[in-house]
Amino acid sequence: MPFFIDRHNLQRVMSAEHMAQRHLDDIKIQHKFNCRKISYWYDEKQNVAFCLFEAPDRKSMEAMHNHAHNGIPNQISEVSPTIIESFIKQIDSSQIPAKFDPKIAPFALTTIMASSLEQYGINSLESKELKTFYKNHRDLILRMIGNYHGNIISQTGLSYIVAFESGSAAITCALKIHKEFHSLESSTAKKFKLKIGISGCVPDNIETANYQNSIILAKRLCYIAQEKILVTLEVKNLFQSKSLKVIFKGDRIKTVPPEDVKFINSVMDYMIENWKDPNLHIEAFERHLGASKSQVYRKMISLIGQSPNAFIKEYRLNRAVELLKQKKGNISEIAFDTGFNSPSYFSKCFQQEYKIKPSDYLLINEQL
């Protein structure tokens, strides 16, 4: 595809943070116009911003600009591919006058990676095996986080929340963890599923809602991840944009566009409020999402890999596991607390999911 420079004649001086947010606004909607943003920079003296895009044609660029920045004067010019690499080098080395904050522009994005291990079939494992495996997993995570300068926000059991200064660092770290874990041939490793979700936001104070929402989204993507690493579209696009030579490998990563993020958040928000209700069924999702049964079913299968009823049951079982670990009651109390109609049905579902009885799980957990 050809390359275009989109020149914006700004009406007021922009902060680096504001420019970075405008950059992310473009990235969130660019897929609708088949465009890809490669870089941007800001000439403070002339109060002009320049954006470098790859796009199918000028009309696509104009349509995207009008959608994202309606009312801001601009001028779109096609540029030769032969000058793009030197163009990027000029920007990176600050050879043109620009208001440039390397922590924010043009590629930086505070990126959150959530990683966890999902256990199943643990009844056949000895406690010594599990302890060794947990240690090896922890060592792998900590080594990779250190290699890519990540900062651990929180760590609970087999789950980690890590912040990186760029989408590139987060995705590369996740790919390395994913590759090393799946290269293990041990029988123990085959009884676990590695799950990773990645989201991002403009660098900001850790207490802001924007930052906290990014953590929540990363955890939710991690929760629903199956075989692939789930990455939000803006993080994926920034990873792509770091260099024209970067090719985004799709075999181990699945991109989640904004409309799917909205659906996932809507489902998870509703689950958090209603998961204890024993009468929670797919009809409740239909009403909440304003969609038909078939629409909800197809969307859940596509994004989460489960039917609504299977998702509800697994969500409750996962919460039950946490309560069992924390010894928040006996098995019967936990069964009712997690929305099951009877302890016997809870035990049946638990054994089907984890290949172990709740009582035996308690015994193994006490030995770890």
Image: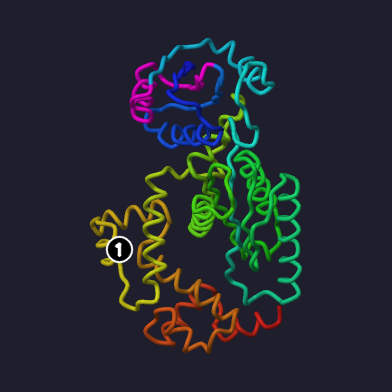
Q: Residue at x 44, y 37 (%)?
A: 28
Number of other residues with Cα within 10 Å of mark 1, as a class: few under 14, some 14 to 19, many 20 or more:
many
Instruction: Out of 160 and 41, give the one closest to the viewer.
Output: 41
356 part of magenta stretch: no
In the image, is residue 159 above or below residue 82?
below
Local secondary structure at mark 1: helix
Mark 1 lies on residue: 285
57 part of magenta stretch: yes
Q: State the colouring used for the structure image.
A: rainbow
Instruction: Out of 83 and 180, give the one closest to the viewer.
Output: 83
Instruction: Specify whether 200 is left or right of 145.
Output: left
Q: Quadrant of residue 274?
A: bottom left
Question: Residue 75, position in %: x, y?
Answer: 41, 14
Q: What stretch is highlighted in magenta?
A: 46-72
Q: Which residue is drawn at 44% across and 79% down?
A: 338
Q: Which residue is drawn at 44% across and 35% down?
A: 25
